[in-house]
Amino acid sequence: MEDCRTSTTPLEVNHKLSRYGGEEFNDMKKYQSLVGSLIYATLTRPDLSYAVGVLSQFMHCPKKTHWIAAQRVLRYIKGTLSEGLYYGFTSDTRIKVFSDADWAGDSDDRRSTHGYLCYVGDKLVSWCSKKQHTVALSSTEAEYKGMVEAAKEVIWLKTLMKSFEIDHSTPIIFGDNMSSLYLAANPVFHARTKHIEIQYHFLREKVLDKEIEVMYTPTKEQVADMMTKSLDGPKLQRFKDMASIKKTEKTSIDD
């Protein structure tokens, strides 16, 4: 793949990767080895998280289409080898989290994918892209579950910062779904949300105790969108800029 042409995105927009149908890929170990390496790459490249998360779902039954998709990720990496997370100086220590979910995005089991990006000030320090364990019956439920996972990460970051004796104000979770935001802040059970498991109301408790704030952000500013679905080139680049994923400047030895 060293001489391959590059790709502007890790996955095709509106991809339809499935475990059913299609030609089998005859070298499962090769596929598993590649995806395992890509998982390692996501430790410093959040823009790869969604694509690698999708590919990792087919480790036990790879198809030719999955192998081609994995090669596309390599072509994307080749075109962005000089990119990485940029951390400039700032005195801002407030925890901000962008949380999003793609409702029923998996064509096989209709489970949703949620994702979040955690910032301390304007520094991206933690991120996640994961398919939910149960089927969400509405976009509100999918978004709400995603915000709960983001809240767990917030609590962990607060504890970590406290151990370092770093002062910070109340963390904020940004979402672009008004219904899930209302559900997080409203203690009244609605008929359409009675089925949501009690464990997910952990977020509401933290909001009522003023340990966490939830706030609306427009979809075009929802950087976590790249953690839940495949985007076109311009959208992905805009969110990468918001996540401070930038090209590194090469310097000479004399510099």
Image (cartoon, rainbow, N blue to C red):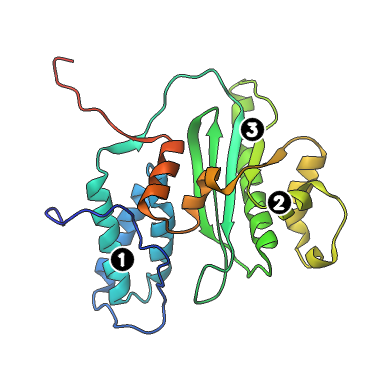
Q: Which residue is the site of mark 3?
A: 158
Which mark is first along the chain, 1 or 3? 1
- Looking at the image, which residue is at 68% across and 70% down? 137
Residue 232 horizontal/vertical position (percent): 39, 55
Determine the residue located farthest toward the top in the rendered image: 254
Q: Mark 2 is on which residue type?
A: Met
Determine the residue located farthest toward the right in the rendered image: 188
- Check disc 3 and report its element: helix, strand or loop: helix
> Label 2 to label 3, Cα distance in Å?
25 Å
| Total tally of numbered discs in the picture | 3
Q: Which residue is the site of mark 2?
A: 178
Residue 17 horizontal/vertical position (percent): 40, 72
Q: Nearer the viewer, mark 2 or mark 3?
A: 2
Residue 124 horizontal/vertical position (percent): 48, 35
Which mark is first along the chain, 1 or 2? 1
Q: Nearer the viewer, mark 2 or mark 1?
A: 2
Circle 2: is it few (<14), some (14-19), or many (20+) Cα within 10 Å?
some
Asked if residue 1 lies left or right of residue 24, the reply is left
Query: Which quadrant is the C terminus positioned in?
Result: top left
Asked if residue 93 lies left or right of residue 253, the reply is right
For residue 197, above or below residue 92: below
Which mark is first along the chain, 3 or 2? 3
- Looking at the image, which residue is at 24% across and 55% down? 75
> Label 3 to label 1, Cα distance in Å?
38 Å
Asked if residue 242 lies left or right of residue 221, the reply is left
For residue 84, above or below residue 61: above
Q: Which residue is the site of mark 1?
A: 69
